[in-house]
Image: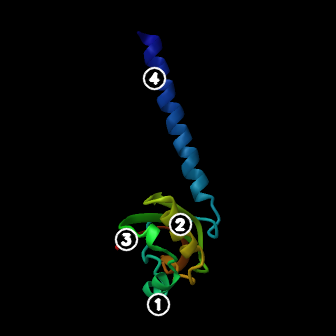
Amino acid sequence: MKKPLFVILLLIVAGIAKAQDSITTLKGLAADTALFTVVDEEPKTPRNFGEYLLKSVQTDTAHKTSGLIVLKFVVEKDGSLSNIRVIKNLSPYWDNEAIRILKNSPKWFPGSQNGKIVRCLYNFPIRLAN
């Protein structure tokens, strides 16, 4: 009985030690590479972004559909977007089209934390309607 209890205790201590190592690593990140998921001020789309989306969409009648695509990406300090990926897909065509449109997007207004511009992880839903 004592041996299984000791093994469980050892695993718990090892997990705590690993968690502490992760916290230390996060504290040691350079400000330029830190990635925020919660910020004082969220990133914002450029002005007239809705018009940009409408002009940029390339479709034909074969691909008309309704639904929701959700993308996740990093808004960099300079407003560019990186690491764009689909987290809720609609179809291969529309997933690729949404990624293409965001890759070619005008620069965004970056987010800030404590008055400093920071890199932010951002979820962006796009709703399509026939």
Badge 4 marks a residue whose secondary structure is helix
Task: Report the side of 117 relative to 124 (left or right).
Answer: right
Amino acid type for the residue under numbered disc 3? Arg
The quarter of the rendered structure image containing the C terminus is bottom left
Q: Are marks 4 and 3 in contact (CB under 8 Å)?
A: no
How far apart in space, not on screen, are marks 4 and 3 (Cα)?
48 Å
Badge 2 marks a residue whose secondary structure is strand
Task: Report the side of 33 relative to 7 (left or right).
Answer: right
Q: Which residue is mark 4?
A: 8
Badge 1 marks a residue whose secondary structure is loop
Neighbour tally class for label 4: few under 14, some 14-19, many 20 plus, Cα within 10 Å? few
- The spot of residue 8 in percent (x, y) is 45, 23
The circle on residue 73 is 2
Which residue occupies the extreme top position in the image?
1
Q: Which residue is mark 1?
A: 47
- The spot of residue 23 in percent (x, y) is 54, 51
Amino acid type for the residue under numbered disc 4? Ile
Mark 4 vs mark 1, foreground winner is 1
Mark 1 vs mark 3, foreground winner is 3
- The spot of residue 47 in percent (x, y) is 47, 90
Front in this rendered view, residue 92 or 110: 92
- The spot of residue 5 in percent (x, y) is 43, 17
Amino acid type for the residue under numbered disc 1? Arg
Badge 3 marks a residue whose secondary structure is strand
The residue located at (48%, 66%) in the rendering is 94
Q: Earlier in the sequence, mark 2 or mark 3?
A: 2
